[in-house]
């Protein structure tokens, strides 16, 4: 009996020596069975994000040999929750406020920030209909307000701080679900004003600078139009703020919606990783992303103006987001206030 038992043990050990490494490999992070989770906040149309995100995922897979799974949670809060639920296998493209909350909640770590046409900051824009009787910041008091999501830095957090500091108390509040929807709500006259992201226009020969008018053109002289590629222009100035996101359905959006004012500069959106994400894989992914940003594929993904409009990304540190933490303190807001409003 002993020889048979010994042979059986040897056979089992031989099988395990062949099968076990394969099973472990299948479960390793970045394998088909355990892909890296890539989360995007739903600040623009989910289908645009999904399509562009898949372009990015494919490029990363080709560069690293790792597998990625793209997801667009239903809200900013859901994105943070998803990252915290997958601390060792998640990466996310989240705005400044979302990052601060995620870092506080579960230790999510920022690795890089967006660069948009040379800018490492962006702004909130207060928008109204062009025929509105709102002409000053104070005129917003008591007026109905559309914002994208209570977790949006430019759409909610920064405007809330600025309005509170100015003694402005909006009237009806409408959580529209995204920047596009905010512009549409103002365009359609459903609300008195909205708050969205602002990216500077492309002004030929004289680049836009901080302190310049948010609308450096005269609509009585120049006309808004879509060029042959579907881009939004006023004269020869290309519009890149949130209004441009609804240009296909509302090509006259600039004629109907104006920018009342801009906020103070805001740190750009982040690329962040779960707190337990393996450092070696993180470095591998970052190298691949920096390389991808130099390719034409970038413009079909996160670099598209209909997606997030990132022209590149650059390293950044957690302390760069301390001004956002200060805004939370000024408002006296907790994450529950923001995500359950």
Image (spheres, grey):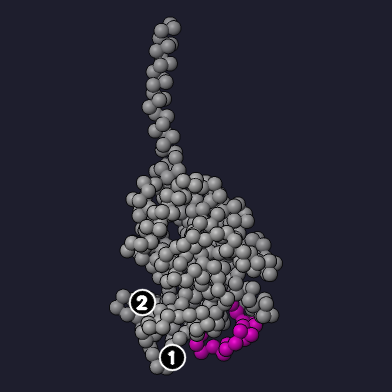
Q: Is residue 88 above or below residue 156?
A: above
Q: Which quarter of the rendered picture does the N terminus lie within?
A: top left
Residue 159 visible in the picture:
yes
Rendering quarter of residue 291: bottom left
Q: Residue at x 64, y 77 (%)?
A: 163
Residue at position x 56%, y 50% in the image: 275
The disc label shown at residue 145, or none:
none
Residue visible at 43% across and 16% down in the picture:
9
The residue tagged with tag 2: helix, strand or loop? Answer: loop
Q: Foreground residue, 113 or 128?
A: 113
Instruction: Answer with mark 1 or mark 2, whichever residue precedes in sequence.
Output: 1
> Which quadrant of the view contains residue 157?
bottom right
In the image, is residue 329 part of the stretch drawn in magenta? Answer: no
Bounds of the magenta span? Answer: 128-146
Q: Nearer the viewer, mark 1 or mark 2?
A: 1
Above or below, 61 relative to 199: above
Of 302 and 312, the residue lying toward us: 312
Please name whichever residue, 283 or 35, is drawn nearer the observer in this view of the structure: 283
Q: Which mark is residue 231?
A: 2
The residue to which callout 1 is attached is 218
Measure the alpha-carbon separation of dots 1 and 2.
Answer: 19 Å
Coordinates of residue 297 in the picture (x, y in percent): 33, 61
């Amino acid at each position: 009996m002993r020889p048979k038992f010994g042979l059986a043990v040897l056979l089992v050990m031989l099988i395990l020596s062949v099968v076990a490494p394969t099973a472990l490999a299948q479960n390793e992070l970045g394998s088909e069975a355990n892909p890296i989770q890539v989360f995007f906040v739903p600040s623009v149309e989910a289908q645009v994000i999904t399509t562009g995100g898949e372009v990015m995922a494919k490029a990363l897979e080709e560069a690293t040999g790792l597998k990625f799974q793209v997801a667009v949670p239903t809200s900013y809060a859901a994105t943070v929750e998803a990252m915290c639920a997958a601390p060792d296998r998640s990466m996310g493209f989240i705005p400044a406020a979302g990052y601060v909350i995620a870092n506080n909640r579960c230790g999510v770590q920022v690795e890089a920030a967006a660069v948009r046409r040379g800018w490492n900051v962006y702004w909130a824009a207060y928008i109204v209909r062009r025929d509105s009787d709102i002409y000053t910041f104070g005129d917003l008091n008591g007026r109905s307000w559309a914002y994208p999501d209570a977790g949006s830095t430019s759409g909610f957090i920064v405007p809330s701080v600025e309005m509170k500091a100015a003694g402005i108390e909006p009237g009806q509040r409408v959580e529209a679900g995204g920047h596009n929807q905010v512009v549409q709500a103002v365009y359609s006259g459903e609300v008195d004003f909205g708050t969205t992201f602002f990216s500077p226009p492309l002004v030929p020969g004289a680049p836009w600078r901080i302190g310049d008018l948010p609308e450096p053109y005269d609509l009585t002289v120049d006309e808004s139009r879509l060029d042959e590629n579907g881009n939004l222009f006023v004269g020869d100035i290309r519009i890149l703020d949130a209004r441009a996101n609804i240009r296909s359905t509302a090509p006259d959006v600039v004629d109907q919606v104006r920018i009342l004012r801009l906020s103070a500069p805001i740190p750009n959106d982040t690329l962040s990783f779960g707190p337990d994400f393996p450092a070696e894989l993180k470095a591998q992914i970052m190298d691949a992303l920096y390389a991808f940003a130099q390719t034409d594929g970038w413009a079909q993904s996160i670099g598209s103006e209909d997606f997030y409009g990132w022209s590149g990304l650059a390293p950044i540190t957690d302390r760069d987001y301390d001004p956002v933490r200060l805004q939370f303190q000024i408002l006296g807001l907790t994450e529950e206030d923001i995500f359950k409003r």
